[in-house]
């Protein structure tokens, strides 16, 4: 066989192996019947995680019936349109530090949000506005974008300027979860 034919055969085998190892199907069987052109395991000698595969045919189809009863290998594809795939990473929570609490002249609290991640992200900042007895007057949350390894000042407004007369001090949540 010529070298070009060997390369083609090797490539076909490599693709088959990759597809077999990855499952090459994003849909779940869960008792439904897939025709011969579907994904998943098509060989009855392969029995991945309690899945069953039979060679019986129904309604004249020339495929196999595939049942996958576990949920440990679901795949999602959140990309849309062309371009490269964007894998999402889990961001660590940002830290929050109170700069100023609400005053009659400024009916809002100001906090500084620090992003410990190398990529930017949106974080939900929450501040409790408390009275002199540390009872909650109001709680406000704000989503803010903070660049990677950066900080941002965030202003959280009271619902009404008249509420500021009841506020004695502010207590921000120490961590702002990533959205």
Image: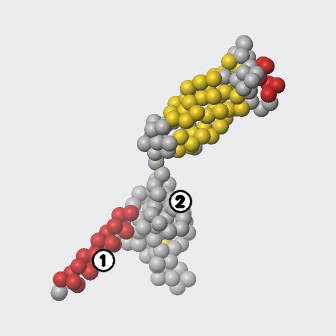
**Would you call the spot at circle 2 few (<14 residues within 10 Å), some (14-19), or many (20 or more)?**
few
Q: Which mark is residue 145?
A: none
Q: Please state the horizontal and vertical placement of residue 120, each as a whole percent of the image.
A: 49, 44
Q: Secondary structure at mark 2?
A: loop
Q: Which residue is mark 2?
A: 78
Marks 1 and 2, the one that precedes in the sequence: 1
Q: Name the secondary structure under disc 1.
A: helix
Question: Can you name the residue that lies furthest to the top here?
Answer: 133
Residue that protrudes farthest toward the right in the picture = 162
Placement of the N terminus among the 4 image quadrants: bottom left
Tag 1: Cα neighbours inside 10 Å, few (<14), some, or many (≥20)?
Answer: few
Q: Which mark is residue 12?
A: 1
- Is 12 situated above or below 131? below
- Colour pattern of the rendering: secondary structure
x and y percentages locating residue 60 in the rendered image: 52, 85
Work out whether residue 12 can be spotted: yes
Between 16 and 153, the one nearer to me in the picture: 153
Image quadrant occupied by the C terminus: top right
Which one is nearer the viewer's eye here, 73 or 81?
81
Would residue 171 be found to the left or right of residue 94 on screen?
Answer: right
Q: Residue at x 53, y 80 (%)?
A: 58
Q: Horizontal and vertical percent for residue 176?
A: 56, 34
The reply to whether callout 1 and callout 2 are in contact (CB within 8 Å) is: no
Across and down, in percent, residue 30 comes to: 54, 63
- Identify the image quadrant of residue 138: top right
Q: CA distance from mark 1 to mark 2?
A: 28 Å
């Amino acid at each position: 066989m010529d070298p070009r034919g060997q390369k083609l055969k090797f490539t076909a085998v490599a693709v088959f192996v990759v597809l077999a190892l990855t499952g090459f199907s994003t849909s779940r069987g869960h008792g439904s019947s897939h025709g011969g052109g579907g994904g998943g395991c098509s060989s009855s000698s392969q029995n991945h995680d309690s899945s069953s595969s039979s060679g019986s045919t129904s309604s004249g189809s020339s495929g196999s019936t595939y049942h996958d009863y576990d949920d440990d290998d679901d795949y999602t594809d959140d990309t849309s349109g062309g371009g490269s795939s964007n894998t999402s990473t889990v961001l660590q929570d940002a830290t929050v530090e109170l700069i100023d609490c609400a005053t009659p002249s400024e009916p809002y609290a100001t906090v500084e949000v620090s992003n410990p991640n190398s990529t930017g992200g949106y974080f939900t900042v929450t501040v409790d506005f408390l009275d002199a007895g540390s009872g909650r007057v109001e709680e406000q949350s704000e989503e803010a974008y903070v660049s990677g390894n950066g900080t941002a000042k965030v202003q959280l407004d009271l619902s009404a300027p008249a509420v500021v007369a009841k506020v004695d001090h502010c207590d921000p949540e120490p961590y702002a979860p990533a959205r």
